[in-house]
Image (cartoon, helix red, strand yellow):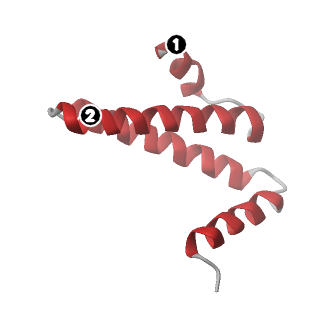
Amino acid sequence: MINPKKKQITDLGKSLETDVHGRYRTTLRDRVIALRRETEQKIKREEKLEAIKPLEAMMRALMIADRILDTLLVSVTHEMNGQSRAIE
């Protein structure tokens, strides 16, 4: 029996291989953008410093994922691309 996480990664790889028109890649990028926006909102609402640190770490990981998807998988960049690089 395959580990559920391993199966999920395998399915992701198969989806990327069979993605002829880039729809799956664009969907992945859009999901990362949505997660970034949600995380930004959580950071703005959070008052406790202990809770902000993990959210900031998640935000950095999402920014990296966003750049990877823009660079490697999607030919057209989106509006948050330049904005995210200006923040750093």
Give the amino acid type for the residue marked by disc 2 in the picture. Ile
Residue in view at x 51 percent, y 39 percent: 33
Disc number lying in front (2 or 1)? 2
For residue 37, what is the image quadrant? top left
Contact between marks 2 and 1 (CB within 8 A): the answer is no
Residue found at the very far left of the displayed protein? 47
In the image, residue 5 sits, relative to residue 21, either above or below, namely below
Of the image marks 2 and 1, the number of the one nearer the N terminus? 2
Mark 1: few/some/many CA within 10 Å (<14, 14-19, 20+): few
Q: How far apart are marks 2 and 1 (CA)?
A: 21 Å
**Residue 52 badge:** 2
Residue 85 place in picture, x, y as percent: 56, 18
Give the amino acid type for the residue marked by disc 1 in the picture. Ala
Q: How many labels does the image show?
A: 2
Residue in view at x 50 percent, y 37 percent: 61
In depth, the one of 64 and 75 nearer the eye is: 64
Query: Element type at marker 2?
Result: helix
In depth, the one of 9 and 16 nearer the eye is: 9
Q: Name the residue under label 1.
A: 86
